[in-house]
Amino acid sequence: MSPHSSSPPDLRQAAFRCISCGDLSDSASHDFRCAHCGDLLEITYPSWQESKPDPAHLKQIWRERRLSSRPVDLSGVWRFRELLPILETEQQVITLREGDTPLYELPRCARITGVSRLFAKHQGMNPTGSFKDTGMTVAATFARRAGFQWVACASTGNTSASMAAYAARGGLRSLVLVPEGKISWSKLSQALDYGAVTCQLRTDFDGCLGLLQQLVLRAPVYQLNSINPFRLEGQKTLAIELLEQLDWQPPDHIIVPGGNLGNSSAIGKALVELRDLGLISRLPRLSVIQAEGANALVRTLREGAQHLIPVTPETRATAIRIGNPASWKKAANVIEATSGACEQVNELEIAQAKAEIGAEGIGCEPASAVTLAGLKKLLSRGFIKPHQTVVLVLTGNLLKDPDYTIDFHRDRLFVGTREEIASGALKSLRHPPIVLDATLDAILKTLEQAGKS
Ligand code: F0G
């Protein structure tokens, strides 16, 4: 399948399908929008209608590949290549050994929330520190295969870090558009080090994405935002790997943060495909959590609106500081298909949840912590029951946003905000650094005091 060819659909392979009008084609325009109605495209596998892959066989070959040392098998994405678009040769793959991320139990957070079994699928353990790598390996591979020299994205930071790394590995040039002053230094530093042409634009993420969509129609650059359906195919493997780790016993709930809403769409697509192919017998409920200040999907679903209700985004969880999420319709569809929910959490709830996950010795970036905060809300609403099994998708590594963590522990996160007084309730979760004279006495006294608390 060539993203920009005009040959008739080859139904033995993957095809592009419009999510609104259902138009099927084996080519896509530069902006990955339907030529007829302008809505987003998704990748579909018409050949599965004729001959479904055998579930037992798939489970067996995926397990066997864990013992292989071939680069495609060492990738936790390409290990599941039977459910991805086909390549001519495995040498085409650009991989950094993404995927294969740990599934941790969270006993302390389970106790805090009162849920019986709680897991974290930690996508922050990917090569560049976020879930973006699982999608980027696929999309960057297809960009190079289609003959592009330049790839580009708009980003709140993680996409740009990931894209720049995969472009560098694959010998491609990369162009990054990020909102000035609104992404963390760690993420910016990654894009710089991996050699991206990095533009800090005086706008927000939505402004950057709008410009990128115009740019790809004017210049020969391949866009690697999650509008690109190849990204979502790679991100699907999170769900496949998770189910494999749970011995194909679906959890009751999966909770994921919502920003531009590509990741939730990808996970939901995977769950439906796994069910349709017979790899799992029932669907977990997929719930999406947004920050209160960037809650476009929450508002849209609550009001039952046919069109997205965009917002002017504001949250310290900068990764999900997005007001006009591109994949909102795909996310709404998978929430409906899996009977999931959509919730919002406020800045205090996010900070508290992040510190609680950190106290498990795992840690994550603020955007990932919305999942634990959202779990508390869904439990209190009765949507999740205490006896159920829940998986939180932690999307980014703790080290992605050290400023947030340090500000939290030094009690500076909420200074001058309307949460300042209420944030006093989080005191017991703070562990600020202690400046001491360099004497043994001072250290012993500190140790003694800490032992009492
Ligand atoms: N968590 C983290 C750490 C993210 O970086 C993002 C998105 C999300 C959650 C939300 O995922 O957009 O698929 O709903 N970051 C993008 C970026 C937008 O540019 O790095 P989503």
Image (tube, rainbow, N blue to C red):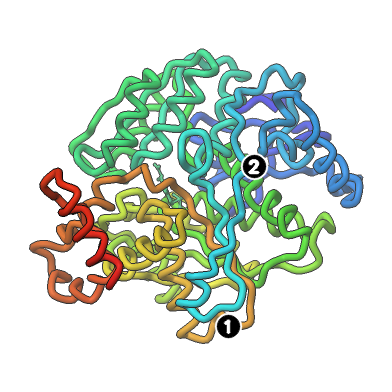
Say which quadrant the C terminus sits in. Answer: bottom left
**Total numbered labels placed on residues in the image:** 2
Q: Which residue is mark 2?
A: 100
Q: Which residue is mark 1?
A: 386
302 or 75, which is in the foreground? 75
- Left or right, residue 59 beside residue 182: right
10 Å crowding of disc 2: few (<14), some (14-19), many (20+): many
Percent of width and height locating residue 19: 60, 52
Q: Which mark is residue 42?
A: none
Quadrant in the rendering for residue 323: bottom left
Question: In the displayed image of the protein, which residue is found farthest to the front?
Answer: 441
Percent of width and height locating residue 298: 40, 69
Q: Amino acid at mark 2?
A: Asp
Residues at marks 1 and 2 touching, judged by CB atoms closer than 8 Å: no
Percent of width and height locating residue 147: 58, 15
Say which quadrant the N terminus sits in. Answer: top right
Residue 332 visible at all: no
- Left or right, residue 230 beside residue 250: left
